[in-house]
Amino acid sequence: MSSDLYASLKEDVQKLSSNKSLDECFVESAKLLNVLKKAEKELSNDQDDIFKSLPKYINNWNDEVTKKEKSINHSIRRYNKTMDKFDSFDIDEIYKYKIPIEDNQKNKKLIDRAIIMHLLRNGNFTVAQTLQEQTGLMVPKELIDKFKELYDILNSLINESNLDKAIDWCNKNKLELNEVGSDLGFNLHKLKFIKLYQNEEDPFKAYNYAKENFPNYGHSHLDTISKLVSDIMIHNESSSVDFYNDSILKISQQLSRVFCSLLGLSSESPLYSTLLASFFALPNFIKFNNVSKKTKRLDWTTKNELAFEVLLPNFLQYHSVFICPVSKEETTIDNPPLVLPCKHILSKESVMKLSRRNSNSTFKCPYCPSITRYSETKMVKFVNI
């Protein structure tokens, strides 16, 4: 498999990912929907002025959407043609050092649990329950109830465009969200403001909503609030406020990540992250295997590290090794990293020395003025994939 083919695939993937035609189709459709809603209201009020220009709106929508559909279909066809050029391969041949599962019950339980947790995160409760019964790995009912709460909120967001449940959840967890520096609450209020602004004839409904909810976020999002509120003063069809700039899908993804983080879980599904990293690494394995076959000089001699470098995107890079900035030593199982309430991270041994080995004794963080105790620290778990 030549490097030219990989370069071609990379180029096609970049073009496909950068193609915004599908998003633009949603935007155009939303504009048409607003026009139709306005026409419906005028019809109920015995007004028919807009109906004269309605065919023009529909024709323009059809032309724009057809053009954008052709663009995205062209990118998809190019990608598929490139993929068809790849030779078939045997995964057992290109990756020889597999983690034993059948003969190692500990590994099997870890994988089964990862699958169950992934199913729960995605709302597949019936399948997860069946797998729990088959494997004997039972997830606490309290945690399942939390995932059901998350799924109920996401269902309202995605399928009903109802923001109220998500906003209520943010209000209940306001302190925790502030501690982790999340702007989910503001993003939800912003989306609700835009929805009111675009779907209501009276812009002051959106203004009153902003007046009631935005003051709490003025210290951190003043620029954005100013732009949103000033848009009401202009109030025209070419408004810069775009409902789809803060799409329901993006908000749902952010909510899911924050929700899981507050439960003490990784923001993304470990199973998803592992498989995604594997897909990124697969071309390197194929290339290494092909070169090994041709030259018969390359050999993968170690099981604990790869014979080549795999370049992963930033969101898949996890730091599994931590050097304490105080002791300058690598943390271990016996001396794990601890996070202070101020979010600075030190090794357990360094924290113990600072607190004079007294869990209730106060000490100052070496990197900021915060005062804390050993009992207020939490262990940090870096993900290693």
Image (cartoon, rainbow, N blue to C red):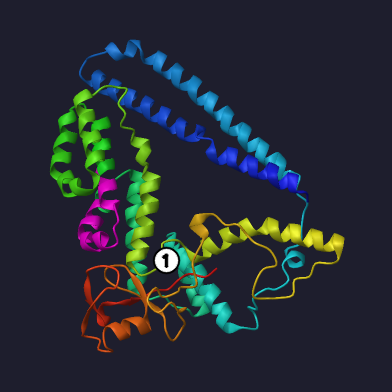
**Residue bearing the label numbered 1:** 266
Q: Nearer the viewer, residue 238 or 196?
A: 238
* Residue placed furthest toward the bottom: 357
- Can you tell which quarter of the image residue 288 is in? bottom right
Q: Position of residue 108 (x, y in %)?
A: 58, 78
- The verdict on residue 184 being magenta is yes
| Side (left or right) of 319 relative to 178 | right
Mark 1 Cα shell of 10 Å, populated few (<14), some (14-19), many (≥20) = some
State the count of labels: 1
Question: Is 288 rendered above or below residue 99?
Answer: above
Closest to the observer, 320 or 16: 320
Quadrant where the C terminus sits is bottom right
For the point 20% across and 56% down, the residue is 171
| Dominant secondary-structure state across the stretch colored magenta | helix
In the rendered view, does 54 fall on the left or right side of 218? right
Can residue 163 be seen? no
Q: Quadrant of residue 93?
A: bottom right
The answer to if 366 sits in the magenta stretch is: no
Q: Is residue 319 left or right of residue 94?
A: left
Determine the residue positioned at 24% across, 19% down.
42
The stretch in magenta equals 167-189
Say above or below: 240 vs 265: above
Give me the residue at 49% from left, 80% from top: 136
Q: Position of residue 126 (x, y in %)?
A: 45, 65
Residue 192, horizontal then vertical, whole percent? 25, 41
- Front residue of this view, candidates 2 and 131: 2
> Which three-letter amino acid code belongs to the residue tagged 1?
Ser
Residue 251 in percent (x, y) is at 35, 48
Considering only vertical position in the picture, is 31 above or below 189? above
- Residue at 66% x, 40% y is 79
Q: Is residue 22 visible?
A: yes
User: For numbered disc 1, what is the local secondary structure?
Assistant: loop
